[in-house]
Amino acid sequence: MSAVEISGLTKRFGDAVVLHPTDLHIEDGEFLVLVGPSGCGKSTLLRMIAGLEEPSAGSISIAGRDVTDAAPSDRGVAMVFQSYALYPHLSVAQNIAFPLKVAGVPKREIAERVASVAAMLDLDALLDRRPRALSGGQRQRVSIARAVVRNPRVLLLDEPLSNLDTALRARMRHEFARLHQQLGSTMIYVTHDQLEAMTLANRIAVMSEGRIEQVGAPLDVYRRPATLAVATAIGSPGMNFVAVTIDACDDAGTSVRLPDGAVVRTAAAVPRSALGAPATLGVRPEHLFAADDGPFAGTVELFERLGPLSFAHLGAGGAADTLVAQLPGERAVTLGKRLRFAVDPANTHLFAPNGRAYPPNACTP
């Protein structure tokens, strides 16, 4: 068993709180991805699990054992760093074998385990090379091999693909998915790239400003973001946000009024006390559809054609009321043309002034 239990974990640097009290349970064999913008606390949380940062409060248990005060080497974890951290004067085989040599593992066993891991990660032909003779993807595989060769209970990965180009990132995502399937070990993966999170994770934990905002399956988080921070972090292109006023509510949902006076129906449930209050309406680009009488309107300032899909950007870049709408790839749009769009109420998201999402369904007392 290699479940990870985090209870009340907190990190402060002086008066600055980098990680607010955090509770998180990671199942044995789970692939959990911590995702969020730079500075949100995800790498700090990972480093505390690894024992590289000392918590200010709270506890960490791995496989049922409290390791809060344990040395990194005594936690049964291994970590893959963003920078690879390979020894330039050692060969690939020697880099992979290094942690086993330090642990005093017999030479014959080291050779067997290095050969096994090298075969798993397609490094057999590279074992005699130095890191400088490897590509970025090959170096990253060596870094992974050095971590995996220890047979860790938990494998920690801190933005391992951020130094790679787009093509290599795609290939390495496949490698990580395959590795998790082969090893069956618990993996905790940190990234700011929501595409990596959506494609790799069994569950996603979205972080913002030192807090975990939501934990769930990738599609659940995409379909029902619990907060504005989650809605911002998940989806590409990002969700459109419009400042609205809550206009009316009934058993079918809620009506909100856009800044230009147009009314949009949503499936959100709001308390009657919120009528007339401000809110934020969220609509994903892929959920907008062309409609001559649609409430969303704007002039096309930018048109992106991306093979089977295209995206029309309505309004001046950077303006608060800019909208992005997804269009079929074959549709041609002229810059300066005015378009109108509508949305199914079930595909809208409504957020209260505190950033929390209103749940779906009817108006509440």
Image (spheres, rainbow, N blue to C red):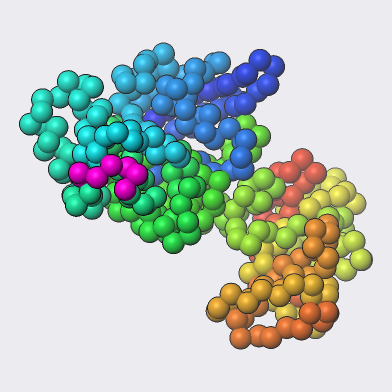
Relative placement, left or right, of 40 versus 247 is left
> From what the image shows, is residue 253 above or below residue 158?
below
* Residue 186 at least partly seen: no
Question: Can residue 132 be found in the magenta stretch?
Answer: yes
From which residue to which does the magenta span run? 127-133
User: Would residue 353 be found to the left or right of residue 137 on screen?
Assistant: right
- Asked if the stretch drawn in magenta spans residue 263, the answer is no
Is residue 159 in view?
Answer: yes
Give whichever of 150, 33 is nearer the camera. 150
Q: Residue furthest left?
A: 108
Residue 36 percent location from the top left of the image = 59, 43
Splitting the image into 4 quarters, where does residue 20 fall?
top right
Residue 312 locus on image (x, y percent)? 72, 73
- Give the residue drawn at x 70%, y 47%: 228
Q: Quadrant of the N terminus?
A: top left
Q: Quadrant of residue 172?
A: bottom left
Apparent side of residue 189 relative to residue 352 in the rendered image (left or right): left
Question: Which residue is at a point 23% across and 22% down the rendered structure image?
Answer: 102
Find residue 83 and report its horizontal and vertical position in percent. 44, 38
